[in-house]
Amino acid sequence: MDTTIQVSKSLIEKLKNMKLSKNESYESLIWDLIEDRMELSEETKKNIAASEREIAEGKVHRWEDVKKDLKINV
């Protein structure tokens, strides 16, 4: 079953510019974008695992506490 989606003019222009060829379908382009987003490099996987360990160990600081410690008013 096919369907229609609505996108803004600015998004359609960005999608047009991302096409590898004039004949590439928007569906193909969107599938490629989804696929790219799902694939994580080994380095990214390691960084995620390290971050999860730091969170579990309580080594993460809240932004509000960091600002207070550094005396930053943002």
Image: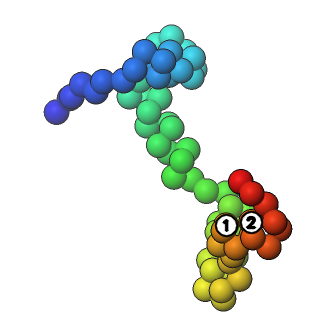
In front: 37, or 20? 37
User: What residue is rendered at 40% in x and 20% in y?
Assistant: 8
- Please state the horizontal and vertical placement of residue 30, each as a whole percent of the image: 44, 33
User: What residue is rendered at 71% in x and 54% in y?
Assistant: 74
For residue 41, what is the image quadrant?
bottom right
Q: Amino acid at mark 2?
A: Lys
Gap between marks 1 and 2, in whole Å?
6 Å
Name the residue tied to disc 1. 63
User: What residue is rendered at 47% in x and 29% in y?
Assistant: 29
Q: Are marks 1 and 2 in contact (CB under 8 Å)?
A: yes
Callout 2 secondary element: helix
- Please state the horizontal and vertical placement of residue 15, each as a whole percent of the image: 50, 22
- Please state the horizontal and vertical placement of residue 35, each as a whole percent of the image: 50, 45
> Which circle marks residue 12 in the picture?
none
Q: Amino acid at mark 1?
A: Trp
Quadrant (top left/top right/bottom left/bottom right) for the N terminus:
top left
Answer whether residue 19 is visible to the viewer in this image. no
| Disc 1 residue crowd, few under 14, some 14–19, many 20+, Cα 10 Å | few
Name the residue tied to disc 2. 67
On screen, residue 17 versus residue 1, left or right, reads right
Callout 1 secondary element: helix
